[in-house]
Image: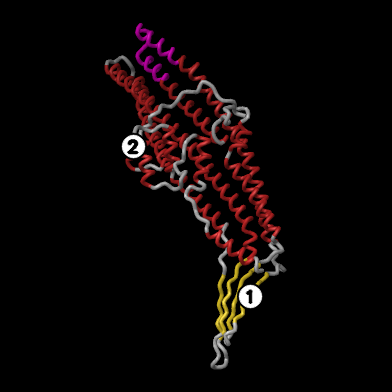
Amino acid sequence: MSRLLPTVALSLFAAGCATLSPERGHAELGALVQERVSVPTGWEKGSPPAEEVRAHVLELLRDGLTREEAVRIALVNNPSLQVEYEELGISQAELVEAGLLRNPTIGAQVRAPNEPGLGLSIEFSIVQELLDLFMLPARKRIARQQFEADVLRAAHEALNVVAETRDAYTAAQAAERLLRYQAQIVAAAEAAATLARMQYDAGNISELDLGITQTAWEEARLALASEELELVERRERLNRLLGLWGENTEWTVSEALPELPSEEPGLEHLERLALRRRLDIDAARKGVALMDQSVSLARSSRFIGTVEVGVSTERESDGLRFTGPSLVLELPIFDQRQALIGRLEAQRRQAERRLTKLSVDARSEVRMERARLQTARRQAEHYTKVLLPLRRRVVEQAQLQYNAMVLSPFQLLDARRDEVQTYRQYVETLRDYWNARNALENAVGGRLTDEKGDAR
């Protein structure tokens, strides 16, 4: 017993030295994100000052908004992601708390004698829970694993925000381009309607032809209004992801929607890559290991109750003092942690099922997004290699026949309008391609290639 008291005192001192570190967890999260998307979070040193974030956002918005700049802003300024980042501070506090011993208790008793003239009997005691000391290493190990799992989950959410931001930026790029094409269709329809009015007034076309032409113009104008609203919606979705408001929402897209890349990386072994790289699956694995240790700890301590050790001193009324150790043992007769063990075992099985579900879902997501990517690429290539050249050829022939006075101006305008419409459909397919590629990267957990550059 005399050897235990210095040990308890030393453990109390060491546990009291535990401190919180602003960058703990954030640095690890930042490294995980940087490795997968090559963009820093801006939170590597912990929660940045609001003024610093505001200045950083303004700097990125100054000369227009690129795709990478949008991702940088989202990682540091997305409101939902900031909530996830702050959760790491809570998780770290729980980690530190798990490494602290329970505070000792101090007691005092004062008893008065039943005869006058005698002094008071005074007793002091200090007691510490001893079992808490022996459980401390296991408890710290479990808390550390929980903290690591929380870091992985927060990093996974950061990657989800990156994917959403890239998707929203691509949608804004496409919406601007579609709006321009629709404006060209309106201009062509207006020219046709104006020409039809002139020819109708001259008695060269019927009222039916005039009505058809004017109807096409009005429908094109309605479609233009819808495209304008679509652009507003796409921009506002991106504003929410970037956490922007006020004057900061007046940004301009400084990159055009990119064309198809010349080739795709190998897509045959992305399922295995996803299982190895995805952070939510890694967090689920740590969750299973965490529950294994929790069950083991509960089982190993089921027959050990609380153990309280301490020192008490008592001074009698005649001045005589008694000092010595004290020991209080809990007898685990009724409660042997059977309910706790049962609950932990069920939670462990639940964690295993969750890991299985995530693995199955990840494989399915990879297959689905890979199919979307391949289909969108084939469609976009069909537009560039077949449909768009055919449309250009039709317009060229229509122009030649119009110049030879074989074709009417209405037919020439229709050919040009059809060409613009085909370009609109190509842009939509190109947007779908980039969204599918972005979704596939997110399903894999980062780039479509491993660290050595080959998907496997």
Residue 327: which quarter of the image? Answer: bottom right
Residue 181: x and y, percent? 39, 24
- Whether residue 207 is visible: no
Residue 155: x and y, percent? 52, 42
At mark 1, the secondary structure is strand
Disc 2 residue type (three-letter): Glu
Q: Residues within 10 Å of mark 1 (few under 14, many from 20)?
A: few
Residue 107: x and y, percent? 56, 75
CA separation in Å, label 1 and label 2:
76 Å
Look at the picture and state if 404 lies above or below 158.
above
Look at the picture and state if 303 lies above or below 427.
below
Classify the position of the C terminus by image quarter.
top right
Disc 1 residue type (three-letter): Gly
Residue at left 56%, top 72%?
106
The one of 79 and 298 positioned closer to us in this rendering: 298
Look at the picture and state if 236 lies above or below 288.
above
- Whether residue 46 is visible: yes
Look at mark 1 in the image and give the residue it sits on. Answer: 324
Residue range of the region highlighted in magenta in the rendering: 391-419
- 404 in magenta: yes
